[in-house]
Image: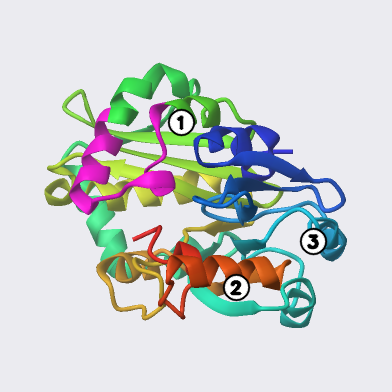
Amino acid sequence: MTGYMHPDYAQSLAEFGDPRELPRCGGWILERQIPGFPYRDGMGCYPLFVCRDWSQLHLDLDDLSDELVSLSMVTDPFGKYDSAYLHRCFKDVVIPFKKHYIADLHRPINDIISSHRRRDAQRARNRGISVEECENPMQFIEDWMALHSTLAERHNIKGIKAFSRKAFVKQFNIPGLVMLRSVHQGATVGMATLFIQGNVAQAHVASFSDNARKLGVSSVLYRSIIEYLSDRVRWIDWGGGAGVKYKGKDSLSRFKQGWATETRTAYFCGRIFDHKKYSEIVKATGSTITNYFPAYRGGEFR
């Protein structure tokens, strides 16, 4: 067990719910109290639900039917499932959520990285920016938190998406974590973490200093990640673009496209286990957001 599948990853998010293992499939969810009601619901761990055996997921979900009102999650785009199986598991909501940008490391590096991004990376190296692996991530926790705090403030990231120092401390000790940092004139100007699971490296969080864009730090860091992982995994999942709907036109999407050979879809899935209680909560809370699931938690991740 490594990365998002490891029990400690769910434990790192315990500020936002009680971790619960789904024993047949080997995945984890967070159980949460529904504010104002004596009921509970569940969500997949942020950012992705990953499990060992997708073919057993429907059995685990059936076991939850007497305990939770609803469950929602975003599926791992490398999961071994198809749309029909997701509809079997999640009888209420199955929608394409985001396109994740994927690098196939069996391809030549010039096929993976666009010419524009290759030039950016070389210019950054010419400016004296170097990249190194952090073999002991906890040694760099202060640098990490300083950069991450800047990122969260710049983009107004809050809640589970922002993580916390306590969460990162837990995550930095999870098997499969890889951390690289960019250095310029002795100072840390960029850092990235990924989780390796099997033949896939899933990009987790990357943070940069205020002057990183001017220096081209992200390009040299991404190129170094590809070079570093080329003999360790087959794929890198860079994640999706900004926002909750895939359009491919935001700046983050355009950047990731320059490091990818293809895309894969992550699905948002939801299931109502108790329709009577679900309707009771929606009515009592006056929920009007019909394109969010569960409706009574509409806007929680804005």
**Image check: 58 left or right of 142?**
right
Return the x and y of residue 92 as percentages of the image width and height. Answer: 67, 78
Disc 2 from disc 3: Cα separation: 16 Å
Label 1 amino acid?
A: Phe
Return the x and y of residue 236 as percentages of the image width and height. Answer: 54, 56
* Residue 101 in view: no
First in residue order: circle 1 vs circle 3: 3
Whether 149 is drawn above or below 245: the answer is: above
For mark 3, give the secondary structure: loop
Of 278 and 123, the residue lying toward us: 278
Return the x and y of residue 24 as percentages of the image width and height. Answer: 87, 51
Contact between labelled residues 1 and 2, with CB atoms less than 8 Å apart = no
Whether 190 is drawn above or below 241: the answer is: above
For mark 2, give the secondary structure: helix
State which mark lies toward you, 1 or 3.
3
First in residue order: circle 2 vs circle 1: 1
- Residue at figure coordinates x 27%, y 44% from the top left: 152
Of 261 and 125, the residue lying toward us: 261
Task: Assign the C terminus to one quadrant of the image.
Answer: bottom left
First in residue order: circle 2 vs circle 3: 3
Disc 2 from disc 1: Cα separation: 37 Å
**Which quarter of the figure has residue 160?**
top left
Instruction: Determine which residue is flagged by label 1.
Output: 168
Q: Which mark is residue 279?
A: 2
**Which quarter of the figure has residue 249?**
bottom left
> Magenta segment, which residues?
146-165
* Residue 32 in view: yes
Instruction: Determine which residue is flagged by label 3.
Output: 65
For mark 1, give the secondary structure: helix
**Which quarter of the figure has residue 276?**
bottom right
Label count reads 3
